[in-house]
Amino acid sequence: MTKAFAATWDYRCPFARNAHEAIVAGLRAGADWDVTFQAFSLDQAHLDEGDTPVWERPPDERGTGVLPLQWGIAVRDKFPDQFFDFHIAVFAARFDEGRKIPNEDVLADVASASGLDPDLVAKEVADGWPLETLAREHLDGVERHAVFGVPTVIMGDEAVFVRLMDRGNATDFERAVDLIEWTNLNEFKRTKLPR
């Protein structure tokens, strides 16, 4: 039976990376999942109440996560065949290579390495609709599901913040998704890591 869910991401979170690498690995291995990749801005989540939303600010005042999310949204919606490669490569640029992903040149390099024409992606971002999409997806997550961070997995009316310790482990991710349907479990958090 197909499991349908959404998974939030911001490219700056290592736990989002772990989960999204697992999702992509699972999908590439044939997992019966119907996944919606939903952008969520950690920059917006960390603003004080009443502050101007990041999507209403000038580009240089939006925070370090907004531009990469715009590129991710543009690739996801306009170039879906390259989305998995680009999505995972942005996380790798940030965490493996220590590159500054809020930099358009870095994102262009990642796009090019992922088989995309970076000028076409940049044009989509410049058109403004990815920023509008980010605002809509972020606010939908907050208003409908009380999303506060990434990665949050949303299945029907249930939303669960998930932190997996291992990268790209589709089996661990599937186990977490299975627990979402067990609504009698509200919180399960280790007091310390046995590592």
Image: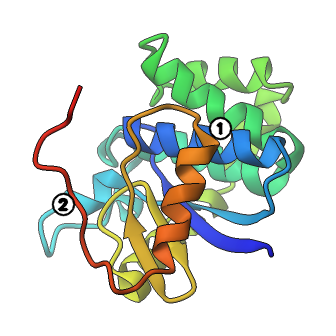
User: Which numbered tag is attached to residue 12?
Assistant: none
State which quadrant residue 128 falls in: bottom right
Q: Earlier in the sequence, mark 1 or mark 2?
A: 2
Q: Residue 9: percent from the left, percent from the top?
A: 49, 52
Residue at screen point 33% across, 59% down? 149
Residue at screen point 18% across, 60% down? 47
Left or right for 95, reference 146:
right
Q: Mark 2 belongs to which amino acid?
A: Leu
Classify 10 Å Cα crowding around label 2: few (below 14), some (14-19), many (20 and above): few
State which quadrant residue 1 falls in: bottom right
Q: Residue 40: percent from the left, percent from the top?
A: 44, 60
Which residue position holds label 2?
Answer: 47
State which quadrant residue 151 falls in: bottom left
Q: Mark 1 belongs to which amino acid?
A: His
> Closer to the camera, 64 or 17?
17
Q: Is residue 13 visible?
A: no
User: Which numbered tag is attached to residue 87?
Assistant: 1
